[in-house]
Image (cartoon, grey):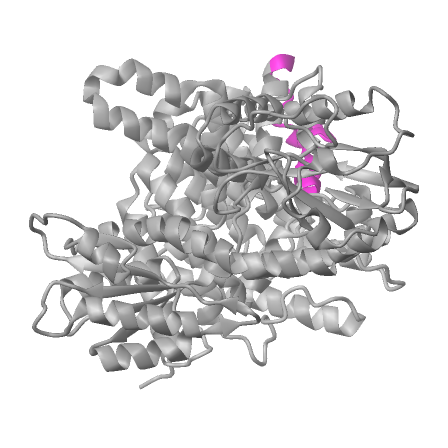
Amino acid sequence: TGTTPCSSFDTARGHLKIQMSQLALCAYSSLCLQVLLVFAKEDSQSNGFCWACEKATFRCSMARTPESALECFLEKHHDLVIIDHRHSRHFDAEALCRKLLMFSKQICHGGVWVTTCVLSLRPDREEASVMPLINAGFNRRYVENANMMACYNELLQLEHGEVRAQFKLRAGNAIFTALEQSQEAIEITSEDQVIQYVNPAYESIMGYQQGELIGKEIIEVPKSEKNKPDLLETINSCIRKGKEWQGIYYAKKKNGDSIQQNVKITPVIGQGGKHKDRRKGSLDVRSTTSRGSDGSSQRRHSSMARIHSMTIEAPITKVINIINAAQESSPMPVAEALDRVLEILRTTELYSPQLGTKDEDPHTNDLVGGLMTDGLRRLSGNEYILSTKQPHHIPSHLITPLSLNDIPPRIAQTMENEDSWDFDIVNLEAATLKRPLTYLGLKIFSRFGVCEFLNCPEATLRSWLQVIEANYHSTNSYHNSSHAADVLHATAYFLCKERVKQSLDPIDEVAALIAATVHDVDHPGRTNSFLCNAGSELAILYNDTAVLESHHAALAFQITTRDDKCNIFKNIERNEYRTLRQAIIDMVLATEMTKHFEHVNKFVNSINKPLAALEENGGNSDEENVKSILTSPENRILVKRMLIKCADISNPCRPQELCIEWAGRISEEYFAQTDEEKRQGLPVVMPVFDRNTCSIPKSQISFIDYFITDMFDAWDAFADLPNLMQHLDNNFKYWKGLDERKLHSLRPPPE
């Protein structure tokens, strides 16, 4: 607990915060562990650990002899050493372990001794005792098992167990350095009220020397008579409940003067689980009670007290309360794990992953920054004028007496295989003079009986498709009506998959087809971040939140309902219209990338995992349970969101030539945005997309790695899409091949 005069409280607290943030950087460097593998020769076991290190993103070194192992260890100071203990004829593993530990005690970083976790790899046979290994200094024994996931799981257990414990020990010095340098007066006592530590600020303020206090019971230190009689009982009550207490407290200095202090008292729960309060009512409680022989501790956050007192509970609040209750009776390792759970639950970005080592990749960083943020909020005089203008009317040359019966033969032939995933939308774009959406829309909507469902004439649907297509920007290299037609095609393909058909009703299918058609209408060829940075009218209208997606959905309904000639909703019943409208809006908004990981994780946890559990346990006997998972209202929403998201960014899963074509188009659009940002003096959202320096293969690899792979793994597990996954694999290898050749272009140079 800190005791300090009110005048210096804020400054002192800020100073301490700086010290602890530096410590935190040290403590969490475990995210990039250094691993040394000592194997006399390469075999399946050494390969298993190499693969595991790569999967866990640990830095791995290999040594073949004790001499090279010691040399490598002295250079890199590894956190974890795995020694092959199976063949004594190669080298003495126990002797090597002793030498490594001896060297580790001689290595010091910033006043903190380096400690290392050492694992012994043993043959798969009965052993009398592990004591010889423990005596040699090994922390853990691993029985020979070359299975790569077994190696990976072993590394994870070591990281979260012994290695993190070593990091905490290393942090001990840093903690006490922070306490020594803090300007707050700090006093630490044991649960038996014996003073264990006071810092120099305490000595200065209170007039005592450390030697006069350490080892004394706190009851022996004189107390001021200025405190209210019931104050101690109030403080004790808080401590018993595991809550912090903060307020004004009068302390008595060594010279007898009373001093008013702003005091915070924090109970810390450590190795012994929930603290049993042994204090009497008259005891001074200006202390943090520490428990546990190793000094490790986890504090209970005072913010939780406010959550406990809420009368209107959100679901997340109930979850946090349940976890808090479980902590009270849990052993320390479980309580600490639950503390980490609570830390995660308190963040607002529950579904957004941390970049981890990927943040070193500028392509991934720029893609994430450009697609998953709403700009830098820069205030500038040069606003980008993208007004909420009136929708485009259909140019006269586009109005033709078009129906399914009189589609030109060349176009009809191009669309013959539109129900195949390998359908070539670029051929249709050329055949229709860049009007693929109207033609493909007529055919797909007819195949799904959309006019019958909406009770609208085909002429109305035709007019609607034409006016929607007219409001796409043909000058955009990527976000034009060909992209909309491509997404519509993918949506229709997914709707024909058996699992999807089992999950969705006809109204869901119609909503999905309409949402795909309008999902990027009037797209300006610039990202949300650009519009927010430029202060565009749309960004102002939508408060810098889901700007484009909100505009696409709103404009689609404005276009549709303003004129009876293209109002496809005119003849449906009001409640059905409201349901359809809500579903369309939800799906269009789901294409916004800031919610990408939320949608994917909800789909995996609510649909993939329950279905997988049923398949493992029951087979056909669980048909009713499968149906209840697929058709619940909440899960149908998740399926529709996932469906349009996958359709929207399915380019890497297309046949290779189409994948390359779309990659070139999106790159050109990003290049044009970077050019305009530089011209207007705006923040450059994605600096790697500079047409003079960008590596298109690297950008595609990053996009596939970060956004595509996990999402399509989940969608494939649900909808069964082996052909898409094969294309994805082929395309990834294609981009990798170009990147390995240091090529920046879409295609290799001609032979």
Q: Residue at x 24, y 27 (%)?
A: 615
- From the top left corner, tell me how far across and down residue 98 is, in percent: 27, 68
Q: Which residue sits at x=39%, y=24%?
A: 503
Residue nearest the viewer, comparing 110 with 705? 110
Residue 656, relative to residue 296: is it above or below? Answer: below
Tell me the quarter of the picture where residue 191 sits: top right
Left or right for 703, reference 719:
right
Vertical order, 60 against 430 (above or below) = below
Vertically, is 678 above or below 148?
A: below
Q: Which residues are magenta?
A: 550-575
- Asked if residue 80 can be seen in this view, the reply is yes
Q: Count how many numbered circles sit on residues in the image.
A: 0
The image shows residue 130 at horizontal and vertical percentages of 18, 51
Residue 488: horizontal and vertical position, in percent? 48, 42
Figure quadrant of residue 69: bottom left
Asked if residue 463 shows in the view, the reply is: no
Q: Residue furthest bottom?
A: 751
**Residue 348 screen position, x and y as percent:** 64, 39
Quadrant of the image for the C terminus? Answer: bottom left
Q: Is residue 573 magenta?
A: yes
77 sits left or right of 220 in the view: left
Q: Nearer the viewer, residue 37 or 591?
A: 37
Task: Tell whether position 692 is magenta.
Answer: no
- Give the left or right position of residue 692, taking residue 374 as reference: left
Q: Is residue 123 above or below residue 668?
A: above
Q: 557 and 494: which one is in front?
A: 494
